[in-house]
Image (tube, rainbow, N blue to C red):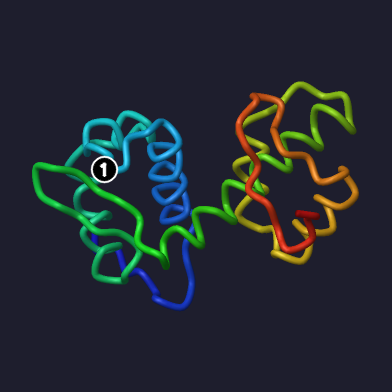
Amino acid sequence: MEIELNPEESSESVEEYLEALWVSEEEEKPLAKIKWISEHLDVAPPSAVEILKKMEKQGYTDYEARKGVKLTKKGRKIARQTIRNHRLIETLMKKTLGQEVDEKVACGIEHHLTKEFADALCTELGHPRKCPHDDPIPKGDCCPD
């Protein structure tokens, strides 16, 4: 199965890979290993390699065989927004709605939030700096310094 990545759009799958690379960086592993990525995303290593190589051609990642993968500036921008969306949704679930965080729901919604909606949600939530899992929420344009 051929996977086409449109340079103007990022699919949910691409966003999941970028999000995983962001988490790897947060865990102080700037070069994510294929094994870690495949386990984190529950995909077979050869599938991860195939997608990551295509993502590299689109400018989202730098892939170094046998070493690992890291985000490019272009990939980091999308990863940052995806992580921000996810963690804002988690915060909404837990603190505003009083619900347990449902990762599947948060993951499903994160891909469909516009930057403007995320900024409005962030403002409504009082510009939280941490999600319910105590992970940092990247600042948005709406956040005070």
Which residue corresponds to mark 1?
31
Quick check: 20 above or below 5?
above
Disc 1 residue type (three-letter): Leu
Q: Position of residue 110 (x, y in %)?
A: 64, 49
Instruction: Identify the image quadrant of the C terminus.
Output: bottom right
Q: Is residue 85 left or right of residue 33?
A: right
Residue at x 26%, y 54% (from the top left corner): 52
Q: Is residue 118 left or right of residue 80?
A: right
Helix, strand or loop status at disc 1: loop
- The image quarter containing residue 76 is bottom left
Residue at x 85%, y 29% (from the top left corner): 95
Q: Position of residue 98 (x, y in %)?
A: 87, 24
Residue at x 54%, y 53% (from the top left corner): 80
Q: Is residue 6 left or right of residue 109?
A: left
Q: Position of residue 72 (x, y in %)?
A: 35, 62
Query: What is the residue that sits farthest to the front in this orientation?
Result: 145
Q: Which residue occupies the foreground of this view, 95 or 8?
A: 95
Q: Position of residue 69 (x, y in %)?
A: 25, 48
Q: Is residue 113 left or right of residue 65?
A: right
- The image quarter containing residue 102 is top right
